[in-house]
Amino acid sequence: MLLSPPDRADSPAQVSFRRFPMNNILKSTKQWFQGKHLLALGILALSLVLVACDANAKQSTFGTAGPVAEKQLLLFNVLMWVMVAVFVLVEGALLYAAIRFRRRPGQPLPKQTHGNTVLELTWTIIPTILILGLGIWSVTTLFELDKPPASAAGNTLDVTVTGHQWWFEFEYPNADGNGTVITTANELRVPVGRAVEVLLQSDDVIHSFWIPKLAGKVDMVPTRNNRLWFLADETGTFYGQCAEFCGTAHAQMKFLVQVLTQEEYDAWVAGFGQTPQLSAAAQAGQQVFNGAGGCVVCHTVNGSDNPAIVAGRMQGFLNTEVGIAPGPNMTDLATRQTFAAGLIDLNRENLRVWLTNPEDIKPGNHMASRATIYQTADGRTSLTQTQVSALIEYLLSLK
Amino acid sequence: MATATNVMARPASASGLWSWITTVDHKRIGILYGVTAFLFFLLAGIEAGVIRMQLAVPDNTLVSPDVFNQMFTMHATAMIFMAIMPMSSAFFNFIIPLAIGARDVAFPRLNAFSYWTFLFGALLIHFSFVVQQVPDAGWFSYANLSEKPFSSGQGIDFWALGLQVLGVASLAAAFNFVVTIINMRAPGMSLMRMPLFVWMTLVTSILLVLAFPVITVGLIELTMDRAFGTSFFNTAGGGDPILWQHLFWIFGHPEVYILILPPMGIVSEIIPTFSKKPLFGYPVMVFSGIVIGIMGWAVWSHHMFTVGLGPVANSVFTITTMLIAVPTGVKIFNWIGTMWGGSIEFKTPMLFAIGFVALFIVGGLSGVSHAVSPSDAQQQDTYYIVAHIHYVLFGGSIFGLFAGIYYWFPKITGRLMHEGLGKLNFWLMFVGMNITFFPMHFLGLNGMPRRIYTYSSDFGWDWLNLVASAGYFVLFAGIVAFLVNFFITVKNGKLAGHDPWDAPGLEWTIASPPPVYNFAKVPQVVGLDHYWLVKRRAAAEGHPITEAEAYVDPETIHMPSPSYWPIVTAFGVLVLAAGFLIEFPWPYIKFPVPIIGGIISFIGVLGWSFEPAAPEAHHGSEDHH
């Protein structure tokens, strides 16, 4: 028999195969895998997986807090266990075949089977049925999650979100049911238990709106009006992040969702945009803010970001080829937890670092590249430290 | 013909640099493809290292965001277009003519043209590093981020024009292999006797022919937008950025199968050889490959589930994407079926092939989870996807290609790679790959988006990132083991003989390395697994085959002659494309350089057309194109 190993003992490949104690290794591996080792290994693997699936992480898709994310997670969880079962079965069959049918010395040519129609049909039909079942469930969920449930009709909150390189603008066309318009940035406040209908737009490139614990992402595409809805079951702070690559500072385009009780939300809406009380120092800061070529060119305090107004303010300041880029609305800035698109905590020290040179915190941001005060040799502001302190004083008075 | 057109005599050097530059021998071109692709594989691997080191710890400042964006853009672009595809091409070139019993490919000079165009395209893209204008909008370069207002440097131009040149190379090669496989098979090799690798090459080549024109259109439109101010994708002028996504993914999804089908073909050769059993369910394996090739056209929008196409479109692509898992699953079952009841020998090629199956199962399963569009809304553009594509493209394509290298290395060089080092290489890569990429599933599910250059510590992504980055070093060590193995065995390895694995393919009937003419006598193919049938029949008759087909004097066999024109024409294509990087402030003619490139190409084609078929005039009557 030509194909049996003894006839091929002179082949050089065979020599090194003999030298390598593969059979011994396989044998001890097989023994090791039998009995309690296998159990221990299984428990170890499972506990590693459980540790790795961290529902407490700020953006974990496992730590759901609303029906949209919950339905998406349910689908994934069921699918995951199906995947685990298929994984164990198929990898098990592969491993078993590799160990059971390894070549033994003196083994004759194995039976030359070419196929098995029944078997092949079986492993075509079973996955097809499994997959179609999953497909029907997916499609049902898809339509179910497309719009808020009928029960929420008339009780939804509309928010328009506009993506900018690299921050989020939130506009409430009717924040309180009486036509109050609120424009804010990077921190979305919504009442608990109420469906929020989000209209997604973009001012420049494609971004994506994603709050993992509340809802899967939908892209924000210029020229399109995409929609998404979510509902938060509990109050608290949730974390969102841009999920479509959008340029240099993509990693630092985040936002917060503050889920408030209805009373807290109403109070926030009622108190939004009140004229702030300014100390003498803050008034000095306000003058810097509103001065020629000052922050006011791009940032609004207590007013809307009407594009025409903003465009008028910014004419002549910006490289028109790049287009007009309004900055985040600063109204009630001091009530926010973070700034620079959800990036760092809002406090005196961080504001000083940011205002001195924004590049140190968020490389590539448009404020550093365009505002006249940062067009210096080392990128540090041309304002004096006294002016910066006054500006900080003013910004922290905005509440 | 020959007498009238002695524009330039055909080159005659048989050794030295000029012989490589002017070669039209499919085996030499295959080696050129393989070596070039491997160098780009190493480069892209180093870029991956920069990415992993930057992400190893939170708030890292090893590289700037701009450099990071360049790294992931060039890592993916190079791996896909300059490493995996040309490595597959290397096997197409070297193995296909041998596996079908042909003397060469159908169009040997076109084959040389493909290689040089590929090399020039790859160099053009990488020239961006020299002029510090590196592409940085991702390998998908989504419009309108890739448009002038948002990417004002020349990076995207390098990317778009380089890909155009690479596309020319891929198309020329694909046409060549479709024609070769359909027309050049040895007598007796009917379609259903073709080895599975040949089948998968045919399907891949057809996919290439159909898919590359789509990206070509997209790239032309992008270049028009950037160079001439049109508004195909530019929203400021009323263009639609989603059009780019459709064009890109109508190309991009078949491209995924272009990357995976050849390695699937390779492991379908290796598993039967080392199990000593014919491929289980050969007709189904062929059919599922074709079905994947066809269905691959109907799933592109699963890359766009979050774009907002609406529930109807998303439903359709949910179902089609799920269904493509069926033929893929069938392939996996049939590989296991081949091993079942076999006599499995664990040589390095077989280890890589089994590794391919084991890892592809993981990638295939996570692929099914992407098809579930509602839950995909949570996973799209996260590290979960990064994990998936690396299980498919590294665990799949790269493992399959390494299996192919170990399997055909003795045929190509005449020497065996070292088994011990080979096994070390396999285990380091297998373990390293899982340490690097498995944690990424969890990173994605824990909310880490992809393509972010930094993250802060309070998001709970620290330790999984550190583990993934540590895995990179294990992978790196695996590649080092391969390189050591390669360099010690390429000149000094054990002599392999013509058929070291007792393999069934036609390529094993001839000497290793194969003589320049491949087969002295055109073989008569007796069936699927031809050489097994021949060897067993001979053994049964009492005179077993121990030697390759005997050498004959190559002078007695007419072979296609070397030519200068492929590289000249390819150079013209390079100048034509690169010329769009140099803008002149002239009225009407802003880009004069491409005209020069066009003229060079035209001269190249002209010289090519009127070239005598052989250096000696008396060979002129046998025209080889």
Image (cartoon, coloured by chain):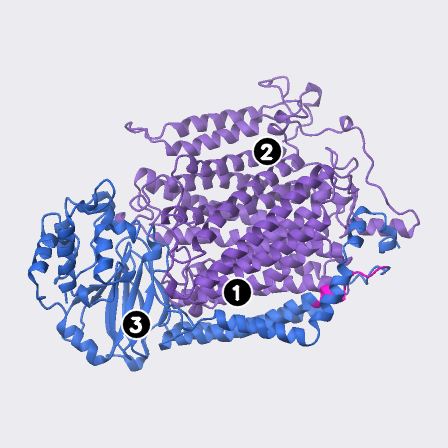
Lateral position of residue A269 relative to residue B129, left or right: left
- Amino acid residing under circle 3: Thr
Drawing shade for chain B = purple
Please say if B609 is above or below A214: above
- Residue at the location (58% across, 56% down)? B432
Q: Quadrant of residue B223?
A: top left
In the image, are marks 2 and 3 on the same chain? no
Q: Quadrant of the C terminus of chain B?
A: top right
Q: Which residues are magenta?
A: A96-105
Q: Are marks 1 and 2 on the same chain?
A: yes
**What is the C-alpha distance between the residues marked 2 and 3?**
61 Å
Residue A326 point in image, percent of width and height: 20, 54
Which residue is under mark 1?
A: B366
- Type of the residue with mark 1: Ser
Relative image position of residue A192 (x, y in whole percent): 27, 78
Q: Which residue is mark 2?
A: B112
Q: Which chain is blue?
A: A
Chain for disc number 2: B
Q: Is residue A99 magenta?
A: yes
